[in-house]
Image (tube, rainbow, N blue to C red):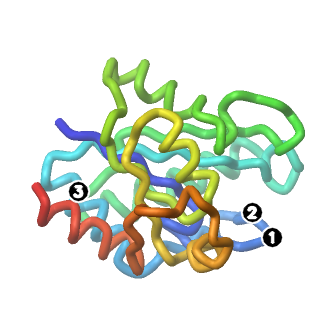
Amino acid sequence: MPLIILDRDGVINQDSDRYIRTVDEFIPIPGSLDAIVRLNQAGYTVLVATNQSGLARGYFDADTLAAMHHRLDDLLGALGGHIDGIYVCPHGPDDDCDCRKPRAGLLEQIARDYDTDLHDVPVVGDSLRDLQAALKVGARPLLVRTGKGERTLASGAPELAGIPVYADLAACVNDLLTED
């Protein structure tokens, strides 16, 4: 079963520079849930790897984060889809952890848990740090323009060279499923 790893904020749901702090602020990007369902139907194991420094900053607590993910499960379930696993870095940028993207700890944990090499596994993100983490483990970084994607493109970072860019998760999934 092929793997795909998605960032959360800006890829699946709308993002905010003020952080997604409540369940009510967890609003799916149009087409993202249907794209996940299509991945499920195509036999993909769909995983999420997400930095959630709002926990460390005290903007929300673990119960609120769990409620956001429960909402995601409910919304996907209503469409016949699911997420197979959610990997969270709860640390702030100054905590010097190995799991906060752009470091590769979350992706390495996925590789251990699924006993697999992440070489060429698609990792879909909207920020440079998502792409950098993917590159560190030999995965295939894919950028979406939603969330912080436009800002990421405008940065002109050298890591962006050759990385495919899509309007949103739905367009990315259309391309991936056409390849298969």
- In the figure, 126 relative to 58: above or below? below
Residue under pointer 2: 21
Identity of the residue drawn at 12% across and 66% down: 178
Residue 106 position within the rendered picture, expressed as x and y whole percent measured from the top left? 56, 33
- Disc 1 + disc 2, Cβ < 8 Å: yes
Disc 3 marks which amino acid?
Leu
- Disc 3 + disc 1, Cβ < 8 Å: no
Identity of the residue drawn at 21% across and 71% down: 174
Query: Element under label 2?
Result: loop
- Nearer-the-camera pick, 70 or 137: 137
Camera-nearest label, 1 or 2: 1
Disc 1 marks which amino acid?
Arg
Residue 24, image quadrant: bottom right
Residue 39 numbered mark, or none: 3
- Crowding near the residue tagged with mark 2, few <14, some 14–19, many ≥20 C-alpha atoms within 10 Å: some
Identity of the residue drawn at 57% across and 52% down: 130
94 vs 101, left or right, is: right
Q: CA distance from mark 3 to mark 1?
A: 30 Å
- Crowding near the residue tagged with mark 1, few <14, some 14–19, many ≥20 C-alpha atoms within 10 Å: few
Query: Element under label 3?
Result: helix
Disc 2 marks which amino acid?
Arg
Residue 129 position within the rendered picture, expressed as x and y whole percent measured from the top left? 63, 52
- In the figure, 104 relative to 79: above or below? above
Residue under pointer 1: 18
Looking at the image, is mark 3 or mark 1 earlier in the sequence?
1
- Nearer-the-camera pick, 95 or 54: 95
Camera-nearest label, 3 or 2: 3
Quadrant housing the C terminus: bottom left
Query: Element under label 1?
Result: loop
Residue 26, image quadrant: bottom right
